[in-house]
Image (cartoon, grey):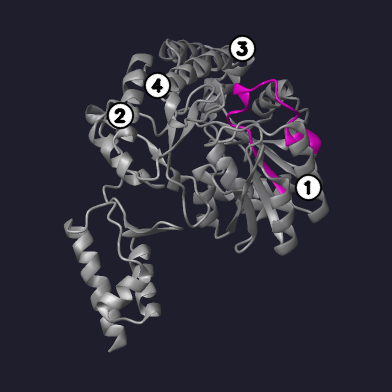
Amino acid sequence: MRVERFRAVADELAAAIRAGALPAGTRLPTHRELARDRGLALATATKVYRELAAAGLVTGEPGRGTFVRDLSGFGGTDARRLPAGARLADLSFNQPLAPGQGDELRHALRSLAGEGDLGALLVQQPPGGRGPDRAAVATYLLDRGIDVPPARVLLTAGAQHALDTVLSGVAAPGAVVAADALTYPGIKLVAAARRVDLAPLRRGPAGTDPDALEALCRERPVAAVYLMPALHNPLGFALDAAARERIVEVARRYDCLLVEDDTYGFLVPDGPPPLQVLAPERTFHIGSLSKNLSTGLRVGHVVAPPRHVSALTRALRASSWGVSSVTTALATRWLAHGTVARLEKTRRADARLRQDIARDALADLGYDAHPAAYWGWLPLPEELRGDIVAHRLAEQGVLVSTAEAFATTRHAPAALRLALATPDLDVLTEALGRVRDAVRLV
């Protein structure tokens, strides 16, 4: 009878939420209130809310209570997309493009067609890429202070593929991988797919907290640590030299591998040495040409420690064998001809300009961002929930990301991550104005 009563209450509340009788943002009774009102044991009331949370209908927030979630799908990790025609601006995803890049692609394809043995591009590449292409990326990395032989550079279909390759190559199912409490959503997807345990690290005063990492290593056998030292997404901090050295010290003491995501490192070229330079024997350095060149190109790379090159090569062979010969040929050409270096300089100026616009629009709302980043973090007032604000903005044609997408903890803060790179500047200004108005509607 107790089981039937639990099911009846859970089903009744679920039906009311789905029908809109309990709208998004409704604060539900406390566990004790629900138990008293429905004649349930406290443990049974807790089970009701746990069932509703597992179904994605409610969320519990420490110190605030249990709330009905917005079911529009515009919040969270797998947020809905608006059709292009209904969209004013996409502030949920960065796809930076410079004027004239389409013409550059047309010219590059024509030049590629007229040079050398074009038929060679129809031949399958070896896992990790062809020698000349790997050498071109190794040369490019010299500007980041990374000096490695081409044999340690493995080409991938973007940074996400590189991240998946690393974890599949070195982290067995059940392994503990540490990551920031708010981090790049791609690591969450890979961790779930590879069945590794993602352990959150609290943020310290300067970013990723080395003391929190050491405390975790004392408690659990940490196989690897995922970090973004150059420019953190979504919080925008850059780790200073002391923090990087301390993280390396902890990793060596507890024999952890380091996975360094440097996708946005080109935006801060004068930062401290990468982790790969400090600890080459245990660092996997991941990069991509998605944000500095083109998201559609899908060319990335990972610099692997010597003893792990074979394992990653096998992982590449198992996942996709290799990357496209045509796209790597284009990427190599643009690296060699200085196109990538020129576009990186353009992107750096563009990112700072967009940050100026964002700071002007959101100055009094607690907006927080690195001046060189293509994104910013907007905490929400206590009265607002991220999923409801995201839904409200989507109805106005503006897509944003909620903190839930980035959280490795059970509870996410009420905040938005705003990606600034995609819209035209005039559209960005209008979109940020709509964000400001939505947050002020309290």
434 drawn magenta: no
Residue at the disc numbered 4: 361
Kind of residue sitting beneath label 4: Ala
Residue at (69%, 29%) from the top-left corner? 131
**Residue 106, placed above or below residue 240:** above
Q: CA distance from mark 2 to mark 1?
A: 54 Å
Q: CA distance from mark 3 to mark 4?
A: 35 Å
Residue at the disc numbered 1: 307
Please identify the quarter of the rendering in which residue 175 is found: bottom right
Which numbered mark, 2 or 1, is in the foreground of this view?
Answer: 2
**Residue 122, placed above or below residue 1:** above
Residue at (48%, 29%) from the top-left corner? 375
Which numbered mark, 1 or 4, is in the foreground of this view?
Answer: 4
The span shown in magenta is 257-278
* Residue 209 appears in the rendering: yes
Q: Earlier in the sequence, mark 1 or mark 3?
A: 1
- The image shows residue 236 at horizontal and vertical percentages of 57, 32
271 drawn magenta: yes
Kind of residue sitting beneath label 2: Asp
Residue at (16%, 59%) from the top-left corner? 19
Q: Earlier in the sequence, mark 1 or mark 4?
A: 1
Please identify the quarter of the rendering in which residue 243 is found: top right
